[in-house]
Amino acid sequence: MKPIRRALLGALLGACAATPALAQEAWPAKPLRIVVPFPPGGSADAAARLLAPRLAEKLGQQVVVENRPGAGGSLAVGQVAKTAADGYTLVLAAAGALTISPNLNPSIGYDPLTELAPITGFARIPFVLVASSDLKADTPAQAIEAARRAPGRLSYATGGNGTAMHIGGEMFKAMSNSFIVHIPYRGSGPAAMAAMSGEVQLAVVDFASVIGQRDNPRIRLLATLGRERSSLLPQMPTLHESGLAGFDVAGWFGLFAPARTPQPVVQRLNAEITALLRTAEFAERFKNLGMEPQPTTPDQLQALVRGELAAYRQVIQRAGIKAE
């Protein structure tokens, strides 16, 4: 091969090799989308819309929030999992679509461990065990004892069958060695109202649904379900410290991209978003939504998904929970 032709070929190959790096360095070159798997107006939507303009300032590109409700969040997660892994589409996925739905529906169409790239944990939603005043239980220990004394005669409400709150209720039954009947309602608000009215004796609900009920004489907020005390309810004990050691159930949201999203993009997104989540502004705004910021590394978020998938599989199989 003549020297000139070799030089031209070498230059061409060098340019081709440099192309991915140049494209990667150019990110972001267009607006990003954060897909929210729920309708506008909810806490997840409000939190995403708080993040979007702040993240846009950091990245120098517009960040658009797109609502795609359906199938408890699984529809949007499945769609984003199949999207191009170019760093321009994220999904604010809830725990249910990642660690419960795949256990209830093996043909759900996506694998949360292999088809999504974790970016960071985003928010944690405390769950609360509440009791109707009819139960005469002022502490978690008293509620546990009441459930043990009356097998099959007490009932508990949650925001729906197959939700993380339902998982929490079934874990309560198993770990307290009791039997109480599950009554699913359409959301945490109606479940809390059922406890207030005396339709049920206990309920497992998200904190946001009872945030204004702490002084209501018809209901008692007994304990949070997370392993650590919530910063939103620092004086409230956990079930873990109230005789059910190891109890840890909470709602949460995490940000994910399609698998194979370039690692430099994942790292940049993680750095920018976790820095925002650690600000006083986000802590205060999330508090008003009944949530706590939960920044993590990608590896920590992946470990959370993996651990809950395994733990919830056992609960679902033991309790015989079926998808509706």
Image (cartoon, rainbow, N blue to C red):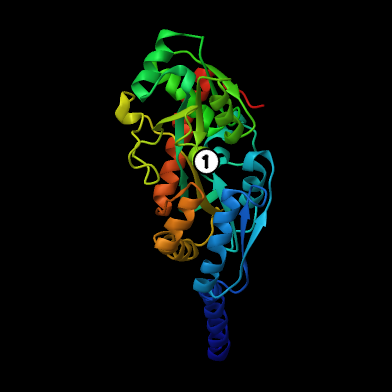
The one nearer the camera, 320 or 219, is: 219
Q: Secondary structure at mark 1?
A: helix
Q: Which residue is mark 1?
A: 95
Is residue 62 visible in this depiction of the protein?
A: yes
Q: Is residue 166 left or right of residue 80?
A: left
Q: Quadrant of the N terminus?
A: bottom right
Q: Is residue 243 left or right of residue 90?
A: left
Q: Position of residue 121 (x, y in %)?
A: 45, 51
> Which three-letter amino acid code belongs to the residue tagged 1?
Ala
Is residue 121 visible in this depiction of the protein?
A: no
Q: Is residue 310 left or right of residue 2?
A: left
Tell me: residue 151, above or below residue 56: above
Q: Position of residue 197 (x, y in %)?
A: 57, 24
Q: Position of residue 201 (x, y in %)?
A: 51, 19
Q: Splitting the image into 4 quarters, where does residue 276 fall?
A: bottom left
Q: How many marks?
A: 1
User: At x 33% / y 30%, what residue is drawn?
Assistant: 240
Q: Residues within 10 Å of mark 1 (few under 14, many from 20)?
A: many
Q: Splitting the image into 4 quarters, where does residue 198 fall?
A: top right
Tell me: residue 260, above or below residue 240: below
Q: Quadrant of the C terminus?
A: top right
Q: Is residue 124 left or right of residue 163?
A: left
